[in-house]
Structure formats: structure tokens, C-alpha cells
Image (cartoon, rainbow, N blue to C red):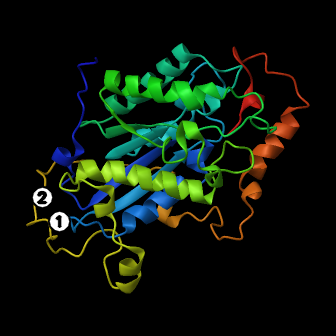
């Protein structure tokens, strides 16, 4: 096990300032909107004594990104990753692996090296290092769609959960299970995916956001042991229109008196290009929204790419291989 960066208990290192910044890194399942949902989920009043906490969620997702650094879409090479490093986020959630599942791209060794590179750079970018979570990617429902026909189902559905858990232990970071809530190996949540079986839809983004929020807040607020205790009901939220938008009302919970974790001095975040998710409105989340349109740009990219040859400059495959 790596000894330089031990597991960080966020609860013991909760920032003294009243804002916690969460950086979401990943591929199109990140870029497409789960961080915006995460902002909404975290803005609900937590059943916590930390009434002063506000949340700032940043979306650093990249369509087609891989952990593998050999591909032209390696996340570590992306400007969004440099922006994430400069954001001085308190919490980082990394959701990579779906695009690595392509039959041409898949290499356990290169995936492992790529994740390690991203984590090590995040840990070295600031002092103290951010609290880092590796997110288990969503399962792959099927590979009989033009966008997924060359993906290996066993990679996201069997190998990645095991590999990522092992990596987290070695790197001294934690794991968020985004795999099981979205159907897991049983593929029991087809309602959470688009027709390609790979991209999560509105329902899936909500599920993933709640899983990420619960994992983060269980650590930041250790007195919250159950996910069900974290969020107030929708009816309560709607009835308290005057409540603070990002945290509680300052009252002690029924579980006991207020108990704030020891403070940590955190430097103010640098200015980056990523917009806070509270200001983003890239996608229509109404029930009538056409899910296929959410990824029309990816589909058009693949269609155009089908008429081209693989890039000779890419040791594995060119950008034409990008899936999500």
C-alpha cells in the first residue's frame, strides 16, 4: 500500500470556511450533467449541525476521455484536468473507465497507470491534498448499438469494480459505488440509461448524483450514518422556501447537540474556466426531453469518424474510437 498519502478522513479535515468545493472529473457521463444534479442534491438541507456549509460543484468532464494515457483522449492530457488541478477543490470525484472498455483500448495495466497518474497529480497539486474518491463507473447494459458495439461488457461489468477498489487501497483514496445503484452486474436499472446502453439518462444522473453526495457527506459529517438521514424529504424541502439554499437551518438535530469537526485552513480556490454547476443549464431535464439528443454531438462525431482511418499518430487508436 502506498504510504505517502494515507486515507484522508474528510470529517476530520472539513474546511473551516463555509464553502466546500467538489470537482467532478470524468468522461461524458460526467460532462452530460450528473455534477449539475449533484449540486442540486447537495443544496438540499442536510440533517447536520454544520448549518454554515455551502457547496460549489465544478464539472470537469470530457467527452471520450480515458484513463489510459496512450490514447489521444487521455484525461491527464486534457485542459480540463489542468483546470481541475488549479481549482484547489476540497473534494474530487473521478469517474473514468467506460471509454477504456473499448476492445482496441482496453489494457488493465495502462488503465491502472492512468488512474494512478491522475490521483498522484491531484495529491501533489496542493497542501493539504484534496479528499479523492474513485467512482465505480456505470455498468454497460449492452453493446449492440453503434456507439458501444466494440465495447467489452466484462470490463465495466466485472473487471473495473475489482480493479478500482484495489487501486483505491493502493493509492490511499476512497471509493464511491456508482455501479450498484445503476443496476450493477444484474443490469437491473435499464430505465437509467439511453438506448446505447452506455450513457446514463436523466434518471441515471440523479441516481449517480445521490450516490456521490451520500458518500461524500457521510465522511464530511461523520454523525450521519445512514443515507436516509442525510436528505430531508421533498415535501419538507418544498415547504421551507425561506431555508438556506445550501445547508441546514443551524438547529441541532434530534440525534444530539451540534458537533463541528476540527477546522482546516484551506487556501481560497484559484480562478478556473469551469462554471459552477449551479450556473449551468446545458441540458433540458424535463420529462419530455429527448434523451437521444443529449448525445447527438457524440453520435455525429462517430458517424463522421466512420469514414476516416485510424490516426497514425495514436499508438492505440485515434479520436475516432471515442465512445462517450
Q: In the figure, residue 148 lies in which quadrant?
A: top right
Q: Earlier in the sequence, mark 2 or mark 1?
A: 1
Please indicate whether residue 307 sits to the left or right of residue 93 in the image. right
Q: Position of residue 272 (x, y in %)?
A: 46, 49
Instruction: Find numbered disc 1 in the image and state the secondary structure of the residue it sits on.
Output: loop
Q: Which mark is residue 31?
A: none
Residues at circles 2 and 1 in contact by the CB criterion of under 8 Å? yes
Residue 115's place in the image compared with 19, above or below, is: above
Q: Nearer the viewer, residue 218 or 28?
A: 218
Q: Position of residue 96 (x, y in %)?
A: 53, 34
Q: Which mark is residue 260?
A: 2
Instruction: Find numbered disc 2 in the image and state the secondary structure of the residue it sits on.
Output: loop
| Quadrant where the C terminus is found in the figure | top right
Q: Nearer the viewer, residue 155 or 4?
A: 155
Residue at 51 percent of width and 66 percent of height: 279
Residue at 41 percent of width and 82 percent of height: 238
Q: Which residue is mark 1?
A: 49
Residue 282 visible within the image: yes
Residue sticking out furthest to the left: 257
Q: How many marks?
A: 2
Q: Nearer the viewer, residue 148 or 105?
A: 148
Mark 1 residue crowding within 10 angstroms, few (<14) / some (14–19) / many (20+): many
Mark 2 residue crowding within 10 angstroms, few (<14) / some (14–19) / many (20+): some
Please indicate whether residue 229 sits to the left or right of residue 287 in the image. left
Please indicate whether residue 242 sits to the left or right of residue 144 in the image. left
Q: Position of residue 211 (x, y in %)?
A: 42, 51
Q: In the figure, residue 254 lies in which quadrant?
A: bottom left
Residue at 81 percent of width and 21 percent of height: 310
Amino acid at each position: 500500500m502506498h504510504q505517502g498519502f494515507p486515507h484522508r478522513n474528510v470529517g476530520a479535515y472539513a474546511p473551516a470556511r463555509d464553502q466546500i468545493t467538489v470537482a467532478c472529473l470524468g468522461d461524458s457521463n460526467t460532462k452530460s450533467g450528473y455534477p449539475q444534479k449533484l449540486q442540486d442534491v447537495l443544496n438540499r438541507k442536510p440533517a447536520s449541525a454544520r448549518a454554515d456549509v455551502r457547496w460549489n460543484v465544478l464539472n470537469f468532464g470530457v467527452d471520450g476521455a480515458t484513463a489510459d494515457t496512450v490514447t489521444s483522449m487521455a484525461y491527464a492530457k486534457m485542459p480540463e484536468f489542468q483546470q481541475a488541478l488549479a481549482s484547489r477543490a476540497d473534494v474530487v470525484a473521478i469517474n473514468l473507465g467506460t471509454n477504456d472498455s473499448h476492445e482496441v483500448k482496453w489494457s488493465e495495466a495502462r488503465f491502472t497507470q492512468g488512474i494512478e497518474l491522475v490521483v498522484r497529480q491531484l495529491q501533489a497539486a496542493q497542501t493539504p491534498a484534496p479528499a479523492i474518491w474513485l467512482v465505480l463507473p456505470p455498468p454497460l447494459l449492452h453493446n449492440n448499438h453503434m456507439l458501444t458495439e466494440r465495447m467489452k461488457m466484462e470490463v465495466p461489468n466485472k473487471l473495473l469494480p475489482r480493479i478500482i477498489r484495489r487501486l483505491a487501497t493502493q493509492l490511499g483514496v476512497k471509493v464511491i459505488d456508482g455501479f450498484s445503484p445503476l443496476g450493477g452486474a444484474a443490469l437491473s436499472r435499464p430505465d437509467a440509461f439511453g438506448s446505447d446502453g452506455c450513457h446514463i439518462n436523466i434518471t441515471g444522473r440523479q441516481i449517480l448524483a445521490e450516490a456521490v453526495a451520500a458518500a461524500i457527506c457521510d465522511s464530511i459529517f461523520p454523525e450521519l450514518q445512514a443515507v436516509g438521514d442525510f436528505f430531508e424529504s421533498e415535501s419538507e424541502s418544498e415547504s421551507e422556501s425561506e431555508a438556506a439554499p445550501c445547508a441546514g437551518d443551524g438547529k441541532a438535530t434530534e440525534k444530539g447537540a451540534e458537533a463541528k469537526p476540527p477546522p482546516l485552513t484551506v487556501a481560497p480556490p484559484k480562478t478556473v474556466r469551469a462554471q459552477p454547476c449551479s450556473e449551468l443549464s446545458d441540458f433540458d431535464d424535463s420529462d419530455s426531453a429527448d434523451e437521444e439528443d443529449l448525445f447527438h454531438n457524440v453520435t455525429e462525431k462517430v458517424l463522421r469518424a466512420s469514414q476516416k482511418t485510424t490516426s497514425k499518430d495514436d499508438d492505440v487508436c485515434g479520436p475516432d474510437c471515442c465512445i462517450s
